[in-house]
Image: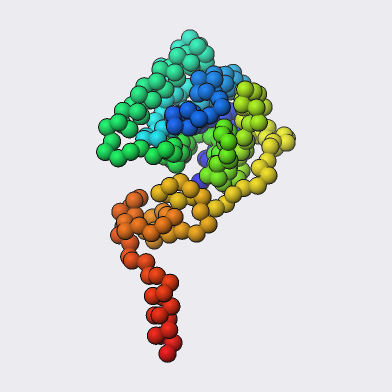
């Protein structure tokens, strides 16, 4: 991403883009309920806004059918007498999340195909980057967007996608060992601005899985098939790319390739 233009705000004034995974298929099997998780997140967002009155928080809900902006502390409707903080933050965000969950479920019911079990993280990341670019183009007076991707993963297994995203962008990947103390993790690790991080010892990933995940089943693979048009990766051969619609050629078997090679060499 291109470097940000000169600005009048200091580096400790932050624009924090928060991507919330609302996929019920994940939270139904999680040891931490979504309501408990949300209470920790709301306290974390409020603490960010309290650290500096110029800080800005934007929340994007990530479902399994679509993504949407559900909160923006810079909007007049989210400020009021509380200046964008609790209880206005809780009321507006919870209302938008409820509307989002209902619409996400309705899209799943109305769709002709069964919805994917995985969340649309790539879509919400694209929306976050578009919002950051909008901030860059808004003028010299703006907060510092947090371009590094910090990942807080709650689940039994690690996420290779989030590990790679955090590693490449210089962010922090953290899998809390005690989910009940989630707010402590969020406030001590993810609440620090980019300027202060140079003086802190933040958690580092022990190992990062750099293997790719297939677009068809979202599984990590060692070898696969790549679309030459859009570079989508698949674990097995398909007649047509599900991403861009390109038609694939037939895959030659090992025996056929060996016989063709033999004819060429004789």
Name the residue located 39 percent from the left edge and 39 percent from the top edge: 116
Q: Residue furthest bottom?
A: 266
* Picture mark count: 0
Q: Is 245 positioned to the left or the right of 26 in the image? A: left
Whether 214 is drawn above or below 86: the answer is below
Q: Residue furthest front?
A: 255
Q: Could you tell me residue 66's position as x and y percent?
A: 37, 34
Q: Is 42 positioned to the left or the right of 190 in the image? A: left
Q: Could you tell me residue 112's position as x and y percent?
A: 26, 38
Whether 104 is drawn above or below 226: the answer is above
Q: Quadrant of the C terminus?
A: bottom left
- Front residue of 192 and 246: 246
Q: Quadrant of residue 91?
A: top left
Name the residue located 51 percent from the left edge and 54 percent from the top edge: 221
- Front residue of 140 and 104: 104
Whether 232 is drawn above or below 72: the answer is below
Q: Could you tell me residue 160's position as x and y percent?
A: 55, 45
Mark yes or no: residue 53 visible.
Answer: no
Q: Residue furthest top?
A: 81
Name the residue located 53 percent from the left edge and 57 percent from the top edge: 222
Name the residue located 35 percent from the left edge and 28 percent from the top edge: 105
Q: Could you tell me residue 197's position as x and y percent?
A: 67, 35
């Amino acid at each position: 991403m291109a470097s940000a233009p000169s600005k009048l705000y200091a580096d400790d004034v932050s624009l924090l883009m928060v991507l919330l995974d609302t996929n019920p298929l994940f939270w139904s099997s999680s040891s931490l309920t979504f309501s408990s998780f949300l209470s920790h997140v709301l306290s974390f967002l409020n603490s960010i806004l309290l650290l500096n009155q110029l800080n800005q928080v934007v929340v994007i809900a990530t479902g399994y059918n679509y993504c949407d902006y559900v909160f923006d502390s810079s909007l007049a409707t989210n400020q009021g007498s509380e200046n964008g903080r609790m209880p206005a933050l809780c009321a507006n965000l919870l209302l938008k999340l409820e509307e989002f969950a209902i619409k996400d479920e309705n899209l799943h019911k109305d769709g002709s195909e069964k919805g994917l079990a995985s969340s649309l993280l790539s879509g919400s990341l694209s929306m976050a980057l578009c919002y950051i670019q909008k901030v860059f183009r808004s003028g010299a007076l703006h907060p510092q967007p947090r371009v590094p991707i910090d990942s807080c993963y709650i689940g039994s297994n690690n996420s290779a996608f989030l590990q790679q995203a955090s590693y490449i962008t210089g962010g922090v990947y953290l899998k809390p060992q005690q989910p009940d103390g989630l707010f402590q993790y969020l406030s001590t690790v993810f609440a620090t601005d980019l300027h202060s991080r140079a003086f802190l010892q933040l958690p580092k990933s022990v190992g990062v899985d750099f293997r790719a995940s297939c677009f068809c089943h979202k599984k990590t693979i060692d070898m696969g098939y790549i679309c030459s048009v859009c570079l989508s990766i698949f674990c097995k051969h398909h007649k047509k790319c599900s991403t861009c619609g390109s038609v694939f050629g037939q895959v030659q078997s090992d025996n056929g390739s060996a016989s063709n090679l033999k004819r060429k060499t004789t």
